[in-house]
Image (spheres, rainbow, N blue to C red):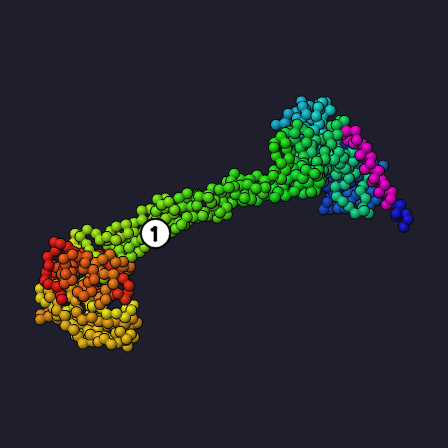
Amino acid sequence: MSHHYSCICLLLCSVLLSLLHAEDDCDSGSCHPAIGDLLVGRSEQLTASSVCGLTGPQKYCIIGYLEGEEKCFLCDSRYPYSPYTHPNSHPIENVITTFEPDRKKKWWQSENGIDHVSIRLDLETLFKFSHLILTFKTFRPAAMLVERSTDHGHTWKIFRYFAQNCAESFPSIPSGPAKGVGDIVCDPRYSDIEPSTEGQIVLKALDPSFEIENPYVQSIQELITLTNLRINFTKLHTLGDTLFGRRQSDLLEKYYYAVYEIVVRGSCFCNGHASQCSPVQKLRGDVFYQPGMVHGRCICQHNTAGMSCERCKEFYNDAPWRPAEGSQDNACKVCKCNGHSDRCHFDMAVYVANDHISGGVCEDCQHHTMGQHCDQCKPFFYRDPLRAISDPYACIPCDCDPEGTLYSGLCESRTDPILGTIAGRCLCKENVEGVRCDMCRLSYYGLSGSDPLGCQPCTCNPSGSLSFSMCDPVTGECLCQRFVTGPHCDECLVGYWGLGSNLYGCSPCGCDIGGAHNNLCSSSDGQCECLPNIVGRRCTEPALGYFFLPLDYYIYEAEHAKPLSRSAPLSGRNSTPDIVFREPTPGKPVTWTGPGFARVLNGAGLRFTVSNIPFAMDFDIALRYEPESLEDWIGSIAVNPSGALTSDRCRNKALLQEPYTLALPATKRIALLHTPVCLDPGVEYFVDVYLSQAQAGCLHAVAACRSQKWPAAGTLCGSWWQGGRSESTCCPQPQHFPCSSHWPGTSQWELQRQCLRALATYRNMLSPSPQGRADTSHIWLLLGAAWAMAGRQAAFLSPAAPLAGSCLW
């Protein structure tokens, strides 16, 4: 056991001593491993395309001149050569030099009579090649060539051609000595038939007759480095007896290639950065390499690494890698990363920019650093002036609001009096201020990261905002004057107008509740939205040719009523009235509403459904019609509730459940039922209207209900109204005209006559239709005082329109 330990100790000590010796050899400049035979220890990597006796014993003969001399022998290479058991085995590994006393007793031999045979050496990595020596047992080849590869056999290049007759064997290759390094020529010196044995062929990588200034240029490196070597024999030497008539097989038994020894001199290729090499493959500790073997892995010095010391080792890339030359070791330099990185790479552009002083660029800088040497703080960090850059905490995060800072929170990374920078100072946007750039400047608002200026200027309207106030710095809302609204105080409230034209804010619209659609007006000029035929800013005046008539009403279209046959409603497909559609004609008044008219035949009728009474009150019923002939009609009207009445007011009054007869002259267009009807809210009523005449015909009818109480403010005095439709009208009873004083010299009865005249002439309905059609159009309900001014209307009065008949009273 102690003997085993001592062996291990000796081995380790020798390895350490060799490493120390390798370092010493390289201290003074370039260093190179010793040259040796590259074939030693590589029998498995040496192959031949032809070997005699591989499949069984093969006869071969020699050329001899002595009688009784044995001239033919057997080659049997099925087993490795042994001087005792297999002396006739001639595999390719027999050519490796062993320096044994009887080395001439073994050789490599090819099969008989084969011209093209190759021998190949495959190395495990790139080696430096010095020269090649072949020693033959037979004649040297009449023609051959040597090739090399530097990419493990993917591509090949010719070293040299050899031939007894170069012009015949290689006609395209120049013969004679090379004129320069790297010239490919055919050499005739090593191909003669003499000597018949132990003749040699020598090939040197670099011809010593040429002076080489720089052995590290690419062209020279290609000549002296290789990963593979191939020797190609292309022609056997014969004595001319193959031309005789003897059997060809017998003649060829004495012509073959046989080589005693091949020496491939070279060394581990280390670019001048190593004096010793180690095995490429890591073997077990109990496996030993053959003595004298040239290994391929350089034991690199000068801070280099790689199989051939072809690069700088990790973190030694501050200078470009270069091979060592003479006394210049060209050692790789360590990168300067200030303790923030352990990886770097070389950048030639950086090296040139730094005057060839430093080209190492640190990678993956830690501790929030960056830069070639990890000597700067990353964006959004700044240098602590109290710490060295090599300190892990030298860079501190910026404390800036990203919304108000340029570049989303960037601060100045270091203090530089020349540049005027202060470490950690935030770079505020134009309209932002504060140490952290987190506040809008005065008269600005809305700090936002998407705004390139940071904040927007306040846009308060000076006419609508208070003069002493600024806008809200967050929302931008301004403090507005009375009746002014909007984020910028630039709008009047709904129902107000005149911003900028008033000393303090806006003024109310003041739209007339009876003359305007609503209390909305134009914010610029205060104009209200007037009902038809009403004018004025506040809609308080009737248009030229019109006067005010106070009416509240509901209209029920005859087209929506249910047809009646005699005394019962129709059902099925006849449950809808016969509608006559009409389109407006340019230049002519429109005398209908809805899609047109409902045609009612003699003896038939319509049922109007009333279900939207808001309050209990009395109503008058008016019927508008349009005959299709010149004959008079008679209408029969009955009002029937569908349920019990709900108010005492209407419960104590009789309904028109019995039909009431109403004359419908052909010259008129409106008929008024003089008996008032009390209607309750929440009760559905059926108003049945039957029409008849002496001869069959059609009638266009309009039914309307009016309230029996008029507004206390008067109908001809400028009272207000809201809602309603401007369609047609009915007249109140004479005792309900409290505003007669507004018409000097005119009696109440005369006012009613004028009202009836307006009804008769409303929308040019005095003349019968050209077609003579009589259609029922709609039924109206008039709303009264219980609705507190439910509506006011401008009624049309045409001074030129003729009166066709008297009033219906």
In this rendering, the count of numbered labels is 1
The image shows residue 764 at horizontal and vertical percentages of 15, 57
The image shows residue 433 at horizontal and vertical percentages of 55, 41
Residue extending farthest right:
2
Q: For the stretch drawn in magenta, what is the main secondary structure?
A: helix
Q: Is residue 799 magenta?
A: no
72 sits to left or right of 711: right
Residue sitting nearer the eye, 487 or 600 = 487
729 sits to left or right of 374: left
Type of residue at label 1? Answer: Pro
Where disc 1 sits, the SS reads strand
| Residues shaded magenta | 8-31
581 sits to left or right of 229: left
In this view, 610 is above or below 174:
below
The image shows residue 369 at horizontal and vertical percentages of 65, 40
Residue sitting nearer the eye, 731 or 167 = 731
Residue occupying the point 71% across, 29% down:
205
User: Mark 1 sits on what residue?
Assistant: 508
